[in-house]
Every structure is written in structure tokens, then in C-alpha cells.
Image (tube, rainbow, N blue to C red):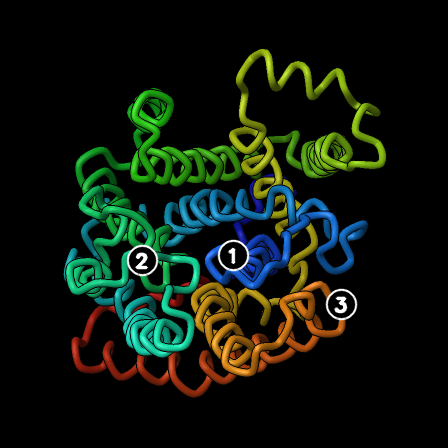
Amino acid sequence: MTHRLSPNRFYSLDVLRGVAAFSVVFWHWQHFFSPLNKQGVLFSIEKQPLFDALFIFYYRGNAAVQLFFVLSGFIFFWLYSKRVAERTITLRSFAVLRLSRLYPLHFVSLIFVAVGQAAYTRITNTYFVYPFNDGYHFLLNLFFASSWGFEKGNAFNAPIWSVSVEVLVYAIFFAFCRFFPRNIIILIFAVIIGLYLSSTLNSAIAGGFTLFFIGGLSFIAYEKIIKTDYALNISVYLPIITTILWLTIIETLNPAHRFTFAGLHWIIQKTDVNPIYFLYPMTIISLALIETRRGTLGKRLSYIGDISYSMYLLHFPLQLVVATVTARLAIDQALFYSPWFMASFFFALILASFASHRLFEVPMQRFLRRQSNPVIIQAAI
């Protein structure tokens, strides 16, 4: 594998992004048991559908959002860093490429949730999960500024917060690549500053920035590895080590075997080391190395990545519809503990995500890019 070029598309990372989207939906299953519904059902995390198989998602599914940032950093440094540094793509073209992908569905889902929350409030005299559904927060969401520090709390289609942070990080990334082209020393320094700010300010922006640039470092590490004589060995042993670490950490969260790997749990607690800072980069580099060696990996499942953004933005609006119907018909919330109901929900979500991606997002993306006439990049994200 020495000196082999990277693939034209990392299908395995598309699949990983899709898995991350599923993880967030599982984590947000608790929305159905929001205490604001006040229907007398005491929420129990361990009663959620198929808990024994899905416990990792119920306990830590929210950590998949951090994976999105690391993945974005890897992909963006792969696709854009050299072009930005060589000035073959302008800031305007870069902005059009990103916003044409992200904004249409964000706008539609924002309007839908605004109307849906109004309908839900009329029935229940309260809101569904996210409280700040006023004009001020609508404007913040409208301009992708819902998590820039101006907000009072979660509002409307709140999962968009991570995309709001990424929009800011994109601007920082562009400036970084323009003025410090692929400078690994400054990149490492930026990550260290980000880690410090994340720990002191507990800021979503600082956290997103740090993880995004860790993803950038991951790409540079991958790029250097494939050019060495040790690339084949690393592509074999790094995935094995990564898999062992994943299984170990998952077992520390398993209620049935919580003390099996108590030593690692103790180390993480005492050193305050967040596993995502090393496990996510190792996972991404491992998949990229395997795919580089094999040619493709996960191509048949890559459609999961294609609809990951749709799933991420549509799952809360769909939950809002379900909550409104069940509130209107006075259906017992115990329904949400049913595996059959969960299966039906995911079927509807996947179907809606496919329709959104193919019939709305892709056509709108092409339309907006034609209108703006940017330099088109065959992007995998």
C-alpha cells in the first residue's frame, strides 16, 4: 500500500456518518417521555425498546454529534484544504457549496417545527421538549446562529445546533487553510488552544472547533501513513487496537458487566481523558486505511451516509408529529416503550429521509449551485 493515493470517495466514512445519525435518533428517543408532557408516565431508560442491545446508544448516543465534527474535519481537509491553499476555490464558491447542501432542509424543517410547536401547544398548553420557540430564537435559527452564544437555550429544531457551530468552524477552516496552508505545527497548536477553551469555557463552539481540527490532524496523519513503508502493517494493527478499545469502552457502560473493565473506567475518570479525543480519530484513520488498501469499503451501504443529514434534521419534526397526534388522541405514553412502535418510527424516518434527499435536497442543491455558478467539487459530504 506504500505511496498509494487515497480513494475518490471514502464510502466507509459515509457509513460511519450514517451510524452516527442513527445513534443520535436513539439517544433522542427519550424525547417521547419528556416530563413536559405530564401524562403520569415515569421515564425509565432501561425500559426503552431493546435496551439490552441498544444500551450504548441510550447511554451515550449524544456523543455521536462529536463524531460528526471529527468526520467533517477529516473530509474537509481531504477535499478542500489544498484547493483553498492554492486559491483554486474562492470563499464565495466554498460558501455556496456548503450552504446549498445545508440550508434548504434546515429552512423547511425550521418552518415545520415552528408550525408544529404551535399546534402542540394549543393541545397541551406547553411545548414539546425545546422551550425557546419565540421570534428572537426563530431569527437566530434562520441565520444558522442558534448556537453562537446569543441563545437562551434550545429552540425549534434544536439538533441543528451542531450545524450552526460547524458553519462558524467552516469560516475558521477556510481562513486557516488560506493563511497557514497545511501547517501541522500551527494545526496542533490550534487543537491545544481548542482543548483548553473547551475545558474552561465549556463552549459548544470551542468543542466543535477542537474536534473539527482533530479531524484535520487525523487526515494529515492518514496522508503521511499511506506514504510510508509501514502503511500495510498499520492498516492491519490499528483497526485491531481500535476495535479492542471500542469493545472495552462499550463494556464499561454495559449494566450487566459494568465492572468487567473497571480499570479503564477508573483511568478515564481520574485523568479526565475523554475517549472521543483518541478513539474517534483512530476509528476514522483505521477505516480510511482499510479502504485505501482494499479499494472500497462499505460501498453498498453508503446510501446511509447520503441520508444522514436528512435523518438528523427530520427525526425531531417526526417526533413532534407523533407527540401531537398521541396528545390529541390521549394515547398512553407507554406506547413508546414498544419495539414495534420504534421499528415503525424508524421505517417512516428512513423513508422520509430518502424522499427528502432525492426529491428535495439534491435538486435544490443543484439549482442553487447553478444559480451561483461556483467551482463544483465532487464532494463526499
- Front in this rendered view, residue 31 or 17: 31
State which tag comes first along the sequence, 1 or 2: 1
Q: Residue 324 or 331: which is nearer the viewer?
A: 331
Query: Whole-Å distance between the Cαs marked 1 and 2?
Result: 15 Å
Q: Residue at 57% of width from left, 58% of height from top?
A: 33
What residue would you read off at disc 1?
34
Q: Which residue is mark 3?
A: 339
The residue mark sitting in front, 1 or 2, is: 1
Q: Residue at x 50, y 33 (%)?
A: 221
- Say above or below: 333 vs 349: above
| Whether residue 138 is visible | yes
* Residue visible at 27% across and 66% down in the picture: 97
Q: SS class of the residue under badge 3?
A: helix
Crowd around label 2: few <14 · some 14–19 · many ≥20 (10 Å): many
Residue tagged by mark 2?
155
Identify the mark nearer the N-term, 2 or 3: 2
- Where is residue 1, by image quadrant? top right
- 142 relative to 58, above or below: below
